[in-house]
Image (tube, rainbow, N blue to C red):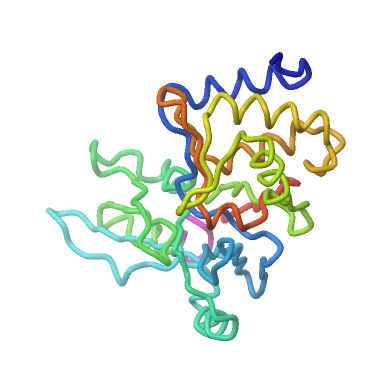
Amino acid sequence: MRLPYVLSAAVLGLFTLVAPAAHAQTEPPLDYARTIEQSGMVFVPYVGMNRGPIYYTSYEQVPNGPPTNVSGMRKLIVNLFPTAHRQNLYNGFVSQNGITDAKVLPPASACQPTEEIADLLSYMPVGYTPRILAGNYPIACSLSLFFFSEDEAKVLSIINARPVITLRASIPLCSPASQKLNISAINQRLVTDGVLRSTSTGLTGNSWDVLFESSRLAQLSPSLFLTSDPQVGWEAYIKAFTLDLNAQTATMSTSTASQPVYICTPDPLTLQFG
């Protein structure tokens, strides 16, 4: 059976992504329609759960106590805290909405020392210049500062007046209004056509048959795939499978088969400080 021309490039591209290793989702999908935003917190639950990540859109820098003596130098750690935690809003938010926090942090690479503090302390020996440390939830990241006593007042003055840490991260979320793909209807068609079969744990089929026949169905019955561009819906559908092109298997768990899949309307969340 010849693959529909309009989808052939997408299928071939997907082959490149998944072969030779299995292609599987490594964490539960997010249910964007149930996003809750309040007091600088954005909670996006996993599909079928009240558990999920809380992202913070407001932060404060907080020194970890007064400077200490280390090998003839002064040392200070500055932590980047979500404002919601500093203002004791987090516990009420979690309790009120029955949230189980997945405790996700932005990548440490999203944080950097400000140019001002880096320039001020650039004279420090290698290994003692301003350095970003990985966060420890809810702390997004920390900044390690070493300096000599004669600069202490100036360092503390800067910390009290201006940011010494910058945070720049873009979280690739989808709009709560994104369309949901009913994969059960697609699965039923492929089961009827003999491409998929039901098992005790979900659905299974030959990976090549699933790829080709689902792409054909997307062109012949685009309404099943929601969008005027059936390739978009088809790609969302295929991502619900674990594909192993070497073993020629395609499997979908029972829980995945029973849940809608979003056709994402991108709505990235910007995390910013400094």
Which stretch is magenta?
Answer: 158-164
Q: Residue at x 25, y 44 (%)?
A: 128
| 42 in magenta | no
- Where, quadrant-wise, is the N terminus in this rendering? top right
- Residue 93 location (% of width, % of height): 57, 80
Residue 182 to residue 55: above or below: above
In the image, residue 162 lies in the stretch drawn in magenta:
yes
Image vertical order of residue 24 relative to residue 83, above or below = above
In which quadrant is the C terminus drawn?
bottom right
Depth check, front residue: 134 or 223:
223
Residue at 49%, 77% (x, y): give it: 86
Q: Residue at x 30, y 60 (%)?
A: 76
Q: Position of residue 78 (x, y in %)?
A: 38, 61
| Horizontal side, residue 210 vs residue 227: left or right | left
**In the depicted structure, whether residue 83 falls above or below residue 198:** below
**Relative depth, front residue between 76 and 220:** 220
Residue at 68% across, 46% down: 188
Residue 267 place in picture, x, y as percent: 72, 50
